[in-house]
Amino acid sequence: MIEVIQASGGYWRKPVVQDISFQVQKGEFFGIIGPNGSGKTTLLKMMSNTMPLQSGEMRLAGRPISSFSSKEFARLTAVLPQMSSLAFNYTVKETVSLGRYAHQKSLFHSFDEADEKIIHEVMEQTGILQYAESPLEELSGGERQRVFLAQALAQKPKILLLDEPTNHLDLAYQKELLDLLKKWTKEENLTVVSVFHDLNLAGLYCDRLLLLHEGKKQICDAPAEVLKEERIQCIYKADIEKYPHPKVPKPQMMLVPHQWPSGQNPLLLKESMLKVSNETITFESPVPLRTMSSGVTGSGVGWHRSFVNRHVDKNYQCDNFKEEMILYLKDHGYDPNETVGMMTAVNLHDVSHQVFEEAGLSVLVVVTAGAGNAVDASLGERHRVLVSPGTINTWVFVNGKLTEEAFIQSIMTATEAKVKALHECQVVDSSTGTLATGTSTDSILIAATQEGPFLPFGGSITLLGRLVGKGVFLCTKEALHNHLQRNGLR
């Protein structure tokens, strides 16, 4: 659909973009990104035929861009430039109607029913129908941006060129606009080429990205390849980390602000922060901790400062236990967004907790354990119902800075240590007669201060892994012993 071949161009014979080549396919959502001054807008002006090429070639639908008359070009391509403060003394509908002039057969040809239908449709699609008779100059910047988009869409183009289309739009309208453009590329085969300032929006919506730097092409590829952490850090000169989007397979770039020293000693998580009652075991941190957990609330990866292990009756049943847990936390003064919440039916006073230290690193381990619904994970298919409650909830608080690998490896090490403790305590799966590996409702938490010693790994023979493995093994054994003894099983 679009071919750019060794194109160079700029102002006063000074090239801003140099020797750039790429292709855009029909129905593709194509993004152009790069730091300020990298040539994004200049390249788009060259593609929109408002700035001549100094060298090279651009072709639309197989024809050189220079061979199109203005009207021919407008029938094929619509352009939405960066938002201007200029507002003409037209109504919204009159402004949108300008997009139909490329399809008029003569200068004085009036709009017919088909034109009116298209104008009405694009105003409805862009959410401006209610402003149809309003003067353009009375609208906000975001509303005007949608008016000019509707004007471009009224041309019914095959190609849509956009220069930072989400400027002046709030979050909801950014999503609506980009969802709409993405839909048109899929359903109408519209080809969209857009300059983006926001890397995350570009990564979310574009099929491919062209990255410019100092007027030159750096890479043109899928977003996951273009938005490599090292590449973006180097070109944008900023501390950036890349993470996957939680809902779609797209990359997201996170800006990491400079953290000024607090002048205080690093936070130290201690047993004194732990409180045990008949109803809950709670741990309150003065600052949010980086967490990875399987809690009822706060599951996955996040930042949390409150930790609640709640006792429930052995006959507890709830169709929506997560919502019930959220209501419980709110009723007891906890913010569910900042709280990892777990449940257990075991007596909370059977808890085992201890600080383990080695070589300047300390780890606090907290375990509540029961064995009523002990399961051999390798023979789980033999189970149909829970026998009796007996959740093993494991908390590991680390006074150190963990990588993503260290979090995952710590969970593996803790799980291996828990299994070893169950075997030493001779806990048996009653349905299979084999040694249990856990219970059917176990939960785990790894929480770190992200201050102090750097801990890249958490495997069983690393410094962190040794403390996690030892701590979980000993605390699980003690918690199981307390539980079994209280219930007259030992």
Image (tube, grey):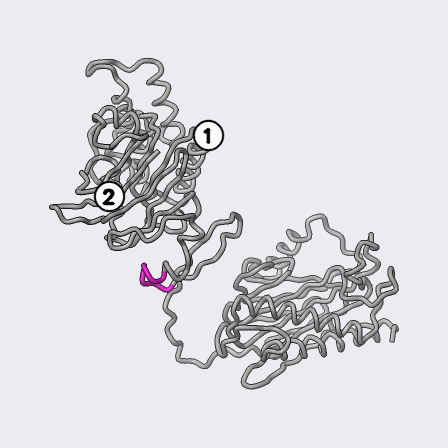
Q: At numbered mark 2, what does the secondary structure look like: helix, strand or loop? A: strand
Relative depth, front residue between 216 and 88: 216
Who's the residue at 77% across and 61% down the image? 377
**Does any portion of residue 146 appear in the rendered image?**
no
Relative depth, front residue between 361 and 282: 361
Above or below residue 148? Residue 294 is below
* Residue type, mark 1 in image: Glu
> Going by the image, does 334 lie left or right of 482?
left
Res. 184 image quadrant: top left
State the separation of the CA atoms marked 1 and 2: 31 Å
Who's the residue at 78% across and 64% down the image? 390
* Residue type, mark 2 in image: Ala
Q: Is 454 inside the magenta-drawn segment?
A: no
- Image quadrant where one finds the C terminus: bottom right
Residue placed under numbered mark 2 in the picture: 7
Above or below residue 79? Residue 339 is below
Q: Residue 226: percent from the left, percent from the top?
A: 40, 53
